[in-house]
Image (cartoon, grey):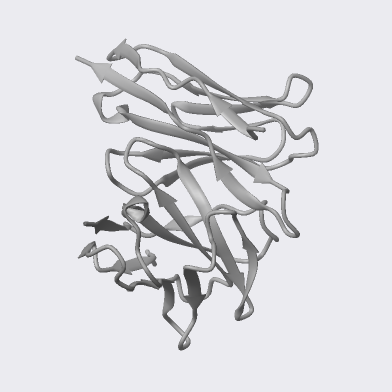
């Protein structure tokens, strides 16, 4: 069964450093997403991406964050200057695009645990 | 303003019990909901979609009550492996397109 893959599974970084989290969405899916989950809290929407551009973003997704689809398979989340409060599990997700968001189920990757020291 | 709210639990039930969770939503125009299951420090996995009046899959039944604006999940004959956090997911239309937002989750613990 096709799945969303994320790398790395764990990332440790120093405050102020840049990090790039990588995702390979399911190949025939059209919508891509990043969510995050701070330990003990709910899963929070960051951004959605369609047709090579951001289609929706939350208040969390400020100027420190950016997303890119550098080629036909990868989808990346960059945090320019990490803060302690960026420590969280970051989940990538994708959806088929047969129904427009938000009416379609999401398929999640296994996440990247980001620890900012 | 919270779009999706759940009782955090925990619900502690014996094996074989029937357990039900509710989730309330605030946007009366919302049409599509989902129940996801999340194991500790793992990704959410889709359990069921709830598009209209309800959905049933084996021991699991999801219902949508539009009049009272809530979604329910019923688990019959609970198994130890059902222990997890159950996430209610619904649409949020704060932006131009809308996206799915998650409730805080209801923790279920099934005991032998």
The N terminus of chain A is located in which quarter?
bottom left
Name the residue: 47% across, 32% down. Answer: B104
Residue at point 45% right, 70% down?
A26
Q: Residue at x 21, y 57 (%)?
A: A117
Number of disc labels: 0
Residue with the most extreme front position: A16
Q: Is residue A38 left or right of residue A55?
A: left
Query: Is B95 situated above or below B45?
Result: below
Residue A89 placement (x, y as % from top left): 33, 52
Left or right: residue A108 versus residue B51 is left
Quarter of the image for residue A8 reads: bottom left
Residue B60 image position (x, y, % from top left):
47, 28
Above or below B97: residue B7: above
- Residue extending farthest to the bottom is A71
Residue B33 location (% of width, % of height):
62, 39
Residues B60 and A32: in front is A32
| The one of B19 and A32 positioned closer to us in this rendering | A32
Q: Is residue B111 left or right of residue A62?
A: left
Q: Nearer the viewer, residue A12 or A14?
A: A14
Question: Could you tell whether B78 is left or right of A12 in the image?
Answer: right
Question: What residue appears at the point 34 percent right and 20 percent down from the top-left corner?
Answer: B78
Where A44 sits versus A74, above or below?
above
Q: Between residue B89 and residue B111, name the one nearer to us.
A: B89
Residue B24 picture location, percent across and down:
63, 25
């Amino acid at each position: 069964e096709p799945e969303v893959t994320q790398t790395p599974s764990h990332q440790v970084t120093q405050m102020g450093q840049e990090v790039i989290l990588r995702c390979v969405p399911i190949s025939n899916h059209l919508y891509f997403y990043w969510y995050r989950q701070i330990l003990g809290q709910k899963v929070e929407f960051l951004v959605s991406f369609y047709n090579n551009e951001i289609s929706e973003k939350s208040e969390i997704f400020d100027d420190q964050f950016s997303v890119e689809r550098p080629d036909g398979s990868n989808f990346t989340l960059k945090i320019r200057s990490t803060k302690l409060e960026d420590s969280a599990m970051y989940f990538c997700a994708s959806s088929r695009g047969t129904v427009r968001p938000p009416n379609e189920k999401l398929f999640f990757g296994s996440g990247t645990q980001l620890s900012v020291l | 303003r919270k779009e999706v709210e759940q009782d955090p639990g925990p619900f502690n039930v014996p094996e074989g019990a029937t357990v039900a969770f509710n989730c309330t939503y605030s946007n009366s125009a919302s049409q599509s909901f989902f129940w996801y299951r999340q194991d500790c420090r793992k990704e959410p996995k889709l359990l069921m979609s709830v598009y209209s009046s309800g959905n049933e899959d084996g021991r699991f039944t999801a219902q949508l009550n539009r009049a009272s604006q809530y979604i329910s999940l019923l688990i019959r004959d609970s198994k130890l492996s059902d222990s997890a956090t159950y996430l209610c997911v619904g649409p949020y239309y704060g932006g131009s397109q809308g996206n799915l937002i998650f409730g805080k989750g209801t923790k279920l613990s099934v005991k032998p």
